[in-house]
Amino acid sequence: MTGHVALIGAGAMGGAIGARLVETGTALKVFDLDTAKVDVLVAKGAVAAASAAEAASGAKAVILSLNAPRIVRAAVFGAGGVAEGAASGTLIIDMSSIDPEATRQLAADAAEKGLRWVDSPLSGGIPKAAIGQLTLMQGGAEADVKEAQQVLSGVASNQTHMGPAGAGQTTKLINQVLCGLGFLAVAEATALAEAAGVEVTRIPQALKGGRADSAILQEYMPRFAARDYRRTGRIDNMVKDLNGAQDLARLTHTAMPLTAICAEVHRMLTAAGLGGEDQAALMEFFKGPNQENFE
């Protein structure tokens, strides 16, 4: 199998990206340490690989969807990693959300091995991946980013080249600050509306088109009100991203008091055992004395 796209990491987000790629006609070869996750994509038409190196062999591009810089590094440069199987000049597209400095170092190390690197973190999550409407913010050389955009055209409706390696990850941190604060603000507003006896489900329509409107308001206020905790993301992943934003704030001497509060709320929920839950579980922070326990 040559001329295919390799996918390393078939978890919740990687699996959604892989499923959309296959659905839109991309020849896909997949590796994940969890073979059950690979099997899900194989059932949709992908081909399984026994290692990241095998997946990358003959690939025109390698997509990474992983959780931390050390995991990305191991998947690319470790034993059986992408660098062992990929041909010189292969394009690596890292769709993980990791810190900008780690990305710059990974890109430099890849260049030493003759590999090209584009950081392409995303916004929109699993629902948008499923319909090909992800928002991608990308860093890397202009020609490489253009090539990555072609590879990802089936999964994204908005792709923006933000600058050199790491610029995409920096933009993702800014995105996560806005999302984290947005989720928390809508959860807090939902709690106030409930306590005041307003029909919460009418609020998104009432505010639609106004300055308070947002995609988070429209999607999540009804979910907050219904205590709909279906998992499309994770609170502990938001902790990771807000930690990254705070690290960048310290490095740049930027005051971010609201982000600090938001991060603490997410850390408290994670400490309470809710880290694996969706952002909808933020309502647990506002639980009143007469509400049922989280289940």
Image: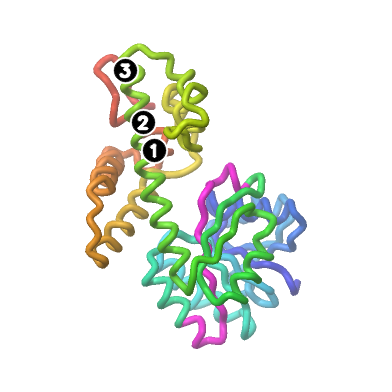
Q: Is residue 222 visible?
A: no
Q: Does 19 appear above or below 170? A: above
At mark 1, the secondary structure is: helix
Amino acid at dot 3 = Gln
Mark 1 touches mark 2? (CB < 8 Å): yes
- Which amino acid, mark 2? Ala
Q: Residue at the location (29% across, 31% down)?
A: 285
Q: Give the spatial CA distance, label 1 vs label 2.
A: 6 Å
Q: CA distance from mark 2 to mark 3?
A: 15 Å
Q: Which residue is mark 2?
A: 187
Q: Secondary structure at mark 2?
A: helix
**Can you identify the residue that label 1 sits on?**
183
Say whether disc 2 or disc 3 marks the residue closer to the N-terminus: 2
Looking at the image, what colour scheme do you see? rainbow
Q: In terms of sequence position, does the residue under pointer 3 or pointer 1 come before the other?
A: 1
Q: Is residue 126 magenta?
A: yes
12 is higher (above) or lower (below) than 187: below
Q: What span is colored magenta in the figure?
A: 109-129
| Badge count | 3
Q: Quadrant of residue 148?
A: bottom right
